[in-house]
Amino acid sequence: MIKIKINPLDVAKGQIDKTIKKLGLDPSIGRILKKPKRSIRVSIPIRKDDGKIEVFDGFRVQHIDSRGPYKGGIRYHPEVNMDEVTALSMWMTWKCAVANIPYGGAKGGVTCNTKELSIGELERITRRYTTMILNNIGPYLDIPAPDMYTNSQTMAWIMDTYSQFQGHLVPECVTGKPIHLQGSKGRSVATAKGLDYCILDAVKCLGMRLKGLRVVVQGFGKVGWNAARFLHNQGCKIIGLGDSTGGISNPQGINPTIVHWHKIETGTVQNFGTSKNITNEELLETECDILIPAALGNQITIKNAANIETRILAEGANGPTTSEASEILAEKDIFMIPDILANSGGVTVSYFEWVQNLHREQWSEKMVFDKLKNQIDCAFSEVYDKMKQYETDMRTAAFMVGIERVVACKQTLGLWP
Ligand code: NAD
């Protein structure tokens, strides 16, 4: 894995400056956009299974709510910190605006290693964290969702904790819940579905055919494994896969579903059949047609950007490409589907879940995916048109669409008092 310390908050602020300049907006608006409205830092003490007390750091950052309640996932990872969560909250603001759903951006996180925690310890961390941010979340204020190393069980604990304090069940306070607890059909694969729809749009715009395209996926979790599965089912050849333990490659193609079971059995994607074990660095530099980073941020940097050999880069992860690397990829004419567009399927179906909960409805999976496809196709073509209009790249265009929408709301609402 490539280890370069890049502060994601610097990247996020740089993107705001660049976009404001490109849109010809008053630079002073940038001063507002570069600061979150509220940053919460909490200490989370829990009793471990061995009786000892451990204290974890927790964060919730709420960026801008001019377009609607704050929305964003909660990440459990050893490297979670305030700057990372702040950057992710900003990306959520632009992502919701690009997807054109009525939300602002937020993000949360707890600095912990879930692999070293029991299920009981995870529940105690989640419930205590929820209690500590309780006054700042809610169905019309801030609606959390899953992110890295959190899942529908985590969301069920958050909903239950919030509901206990309200005295009644409040399903609309969180999304990404289990389906039997008023989660939405299709939510668990929504990010990968949205990514798939974006890739289909890109392939069409580039005059390519999906069948037979060679795909490499970094990260084999909720986003990576489902994206690999969908593309494999549509006739693409998955020639490389990787997780936190390393990668595998096979030019003949890999069946991701069989790798999924192999990983459940052995804890790794490596040592799979006739595939060759490779490092994560080698995985990213494998020549392919579609490269999908779906793990952590800052994976494609100035160090390896020149060696990336793909036609399409579809960013499943948040912030996988640094600004400098992005410029190198644009020079190489790599068609980038930026994170705030490529992985917006997750938050879009989260929005559908919230609407279903508020209306006490349950939509069919077909209805969810049809609506998602419509939303993604609209977002993609708006960004694509902007790219053509300004003769720029897709990332810059996506930020232009997102920031322009938020600024329009801010300007009309005005500054109070
Ligand atoms: P996940 O926890 O389900 O999976 C993460 C995967 O990344 C795992 O396979 C893990 O082994 C791998 N990984 C972790 N560290 C790695 C490393 N150092 N090198 C290579 N692989 C590594 O998480 P997820 O929900 O699939 O999220 C993946 C990315 O997608 C994150 O950046 C997340 O912010 C982004 N994302 C997720 C959603 C969603 O709905 N889940 C929505 C939008 C964006």
Image (cartoon, helix red, strand yellow):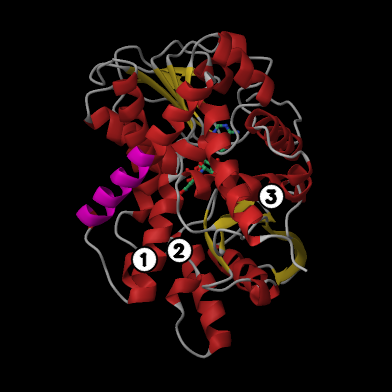
Nearer to us in this view, 49 or 325: 325
Nearer to us in this view, 27 or 132: 27
Residue 206, relative to residue 245: is it above or below? above
Give the percent coordinates (x, y) of residue 235: 22, 24
Disc 2, disc 3: CB below 8 Å? no
Residue 155, relative to residue 208: is it above or below? below
Q: Please report the residue visible at 71 percent of the width from the left and 48 percent of the height from the top.
A: 33
- Numbered range of the magenta stretch: 366-378
> How many residues crowd mark 1 within 10 Å: few (<14), some (14–19), many (20+)?
many
> How many residues crowd mark 3 within 10 Å: few (<14), some (14–19), many (20+)?
many
Q: Specify the amino acid type for callout 3.
A: Val
Q: Specify the amino acid type for callout 2.
A: Thr
For mark 3, what is the residue? 85
Q: Is residue 147 left or right of residue 273?
A: right
> How many residues crowd mark 2 within 10 Å: few (<14), some (14–19), many (20+)?
many
For mark 2, what is the residue? 175
Instruction: Say whether residue 368 is magenta.
Output: yes
Disc 2, disc 1: CB below 8 Å? yes
Q: Please report the residue visible at 35 percent of the width from the left and 29 percent of the height from the top.
A: 199
Residue lying at the far bottom of the rendered structure: 167
Tell me, for residue 17, which label it has, or none: none
Residue 379, relative to residue 61: is it above or below? above
Q: Quadrant of residue 142?
A: bottom right
Q: Please report the residue visible at 52 percent of the width from the left and 18 percent of the height from the top.
A: 391
Q: Is residue 334 left or right of residue 376?
A: right
Tell me, for residue 183, which label it has, or none: 1
Secondary structure state at the residue bearing disc 3: helix
Give the percent coordinates (x, y) of residue 320: 59, 31
Secondary structure state at the residue bearing disc 1: loop
Q: Please report the residue visible at 52 percent of the width from the left and 34 percent of the height from the top.
A: 398
Of the image marks 2 and 1, the number of the one nearer the N terminus: 2
The CA distance from mark 2 to mark 1 is 7 Å
